[in-house]
Amino acid sequence: MPKCTINGKEIEVKDGATIMEAFRQVGEPIAHYCYHPGLSVAGVCRLCICEIEGNPRPQIACNTAVTPGMKVSNKTEKVKDGAKWILDFHLINHPLDCPICDQAGECGLQEQYMEFGKYDPEMAEKKVKKHKVVDLGPSVVLDSERCILCSRCVRFTDEVSKTHELGIFNRGDRSEIGTFEGKKLDNKYSLNTVDICPVGALTSRDFRFRQRVWFLKEGNTVCTGCSTGCNVKVYFNKEGLFRVKPVYNEQVNGHWMCDEGRDVYKFVNRDSRLLQGKKKSQGVWSEMSPGALALDAGNTIKSTPPAKLAVVVTGHASVEEYEDLLKTFQGTFKTANIFHWLNNQESFASFDGLLIRGDKNPNTQGLKKVLAKNKIQATWSELENLLKSDSIETLVVVGPENQAVYPDFAEKISKFAKVKNLVWLSSGGHNDFTTLPHYAWLIPMKTFVEKSGTFINHAGLEQKFQKVTTVVSEALTVSEVCRLFQGDKTLSPNPSRTATFVEASRSQDLVTLEDRKKNEFVFKRGPL
Amino acid sequence: MEVKLLTEFYHLEEFRSLEGYKKNGGYLELNKALKMQPQQIIDEVKASGLRGRGGAGFPTGMKWGFLPKNGEPRYLLCNADEGEPGTFKDRMMMERAPHQLIEGMIISAFAIGSKKSYIYVRGEYDFPIECLRVAVKEAYAAGYLGKNILNSGFDHDLDVYRGAGAYICGEETGMISSLEGLKGQPKLKPPFPAVQGYLRKPTIVNNVETLAAVKYIIRDGAAAYKKYGTEKSTGTKLFSLSGNVKKPGNYEVPLGYSLMNLITQEGGGIKAGRRLKAVIPGGSSAPVLTADEVAKATLDYECLSAMGTMLGSGAVIVIDDSQCMVDVLGVLTHFYHHESCGQCTPCREGTGWLNKIVHSILEGRGRLQDIDLLLKVADNMKGRTICALSDAAALPVLSFVQKFRDEFEFYVREGRSKVKGTTYAEMHH
């Protein structure tokens, strides 16, 4: 555990720690572009130079290990001047694309320029021209002129996704990022390269030109794409959600997330939601407010004998909601017909080696745990038998938030449609419902972004998430619906249920908000 | 006055072949060395004061001493990339005396305990590569390479590896990267090659001339080698003399020899009617010397280093007063811009920027502040990069502008060369 002095402060660091990590430890992180804690050290941007006492030449902090008694400073004139010139070298061929570049507001070059640059450029020659708007793959667009050749994306495809699609071609200041012959950047983690790119060279085709980042707020939550439960943050404003980025969690997802999870915001936005409660009575659809609809459905449920009442649940709701559901249906309505809708169980065990798992529900484990705790042992084949023998009068379905990962959706609807009364709790507005011939109640539900709760991922890890924003304010959570079924009209959340966001184990690698304000590039300065 | 230590038999056509080489004392030293202890050879080389002849001048024996003594497999790499502009001495050796290099390499490999070595030759050297390949074949056939060389129990394999046109592959870690099949981009140091180099094993990278000199140190002993040269710069060196001299070529002289004598005696002097203006003493990366400084310079590491330049690879480029210094600088900045590998930002952008500024001046679009800008940019490229190419690009710019500022100012003000009176287009039509 060597001791060293960083900018005059003496600290003790782990064995083998680099100067970069030591600076982070004292709370004065050094600006950098090519270093990334999840990738190997490249040492090519040279921005992290610092002065070590006794060494006439400035050294880079990311690759130099701390030796006992080392005295390092990055506040000397030599270092500040050097860093300013290195930033200058980054900028001399950089195009003036800020007005049209997605990265504006969270750009590494902009951050450092505002931090210690703010000078007039001395470059009066013509800038190097390179390819712009290059389709590297189906989801990533490259602009070579903006690229500062930090090689983070190349190292990512070599070390993390191990798909080796990217390389740097040509030499010197004619270098450009590109894909190798015959390859496209189409692996399942390709959008991580857009996250780690410090400038606007790699942009996401999905997000390109859609919103300026300073108009977006962000909120941390858990991805519901599969049972891994990567920690993510969603960016949103009153128009809806715009994109999803990973949050570092050492145990669950490291620094990364998969491309499938990036689409989770799509089924949250208004254009794919069920906005109004719909009731089908004697073949005629009418609209009702969700609360009234739930009360109405509750009357039907109360009048159904327990043996003819069944509930189908998917793994998309939170543990607290499952508990409320069981308290209501097992406790109040006294039925044991609670069935777990497993969409593609055969592939549940599949794992691609990095993050993507075959179980496309975030809370299968949570549901299983709650069912087991309450000793519900009903199997799916029992449900099928009950349906076939027309023994179910009222079926309550807690539907999936993301219909796309339920390939048997349409088939199941036609099966469920055989019952007399179908109460469907759905966040998405599905077209399939227009064909239901019996009495049906379609209650709009809130998505994971709009509520707080706990998911249990594949490994049994409990992850609490907090409400980020409200997209459809009339929609209800499962807990609220359950209360309404029982006739209880209070909608306020149970005060003992205030969930707190358990921050991922903060290792030294995690960038704090204060860091980001100063030197990292993921910072937006708030509304204009 | 020339010394014929390494170059003694270069005038003989037959010296290239194994037969001719052996007739003139070939492979006797290998025999002698294999009967010594490896550490003895290292000590002898250390005592001789031999310094790297490729450019950096690092004491060879000391470099060999950095290797771990644990018997871990290690590699010997011969740097025959010879990329430094103005240098063509190694080419002569590979063409005329490939066996001399091979023998020097086997002795050195034996000293450091290496079982495998490579000669990395720049791709443009077609004929030298062919000469080397033929020589290696001959050496294998005669038992000087392969298993149990001369019944000593020492195995050694040697391969000739061809580069593909990159100056940066002459940088030792750039060469190691290239040899590993990667892009020839230098690696971060530390770890240094002697600890972790080729394939992450301890590696020694030495220049062609350095390895060949080892043979003569073994033959005559360290004391005899030290008789040549100065106290800190011992031995002889091959100098590639080029530029505005009557007799350009390679000359072997003892270190400490007067630079002026090399130009006027061996080189035959400047053409009639012209005067010496400047000399680049050690390859294009060495700061230029004015004619007054040349008069005081001796060709050894200390003197040139004290004068603010370096001995480097020993490429002496002579410039007379008919040359426009701005034009000459334009050639150099173009070279460095072309050859920068592009890994680290100061060099990648700086070489391009310097080239653009110099060519702006050459094309008549220069501004007066460009001259100071050249100095600022070059100054800020130094000391902040992974390898020394950035320094090598910056030093000529700094020295040319500082020592010949009047030519630059004239060119900026009038848009044409002070020396030639003509514009760039007219100079290079």
Image (cartoon, rainbow, N blue to C red):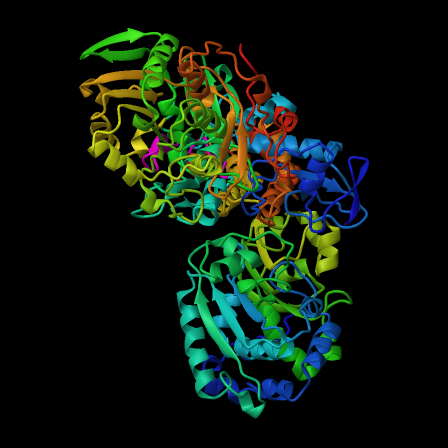
Residue drawn at (69%, 49%) of the image: A65
Residue A124 visible in this rendered orientation of the protein: no
Q: Residue furthest bottom?
A: B151
Quadrant housing residue A60 = top right
Q: Position of residue B216 (x, y in %)?
A: 64, 79
Residue segment shown in magenta: A130-149
Residue A377 left/right relative to A49: left
Q: In screen coordinates, is A182 left or right of A125?
A: left
Q: Is residue A146 magenta?
A: yes
Q: Is residue B321 above or below residue A277?
A: below
Residue B30: name its quadrant: bottom right
Q: Position of residue B86 (x, y in %)?
A: 53, 56
Residue B60 percent location from the top left of the image: 67, 68
- Quadrant of residue A294 within the rendered picture: top left
Residue at the location (45% across, 79% down)? B135
Q: Magenta segment: does it hold A204?
A: no
Question: Would residue B228 be visible to someone looking at this image?
Answer: yes
Q: Image height check: is A221 above or below A99?
A: below
Image height check: is B171 above or below B227?
above
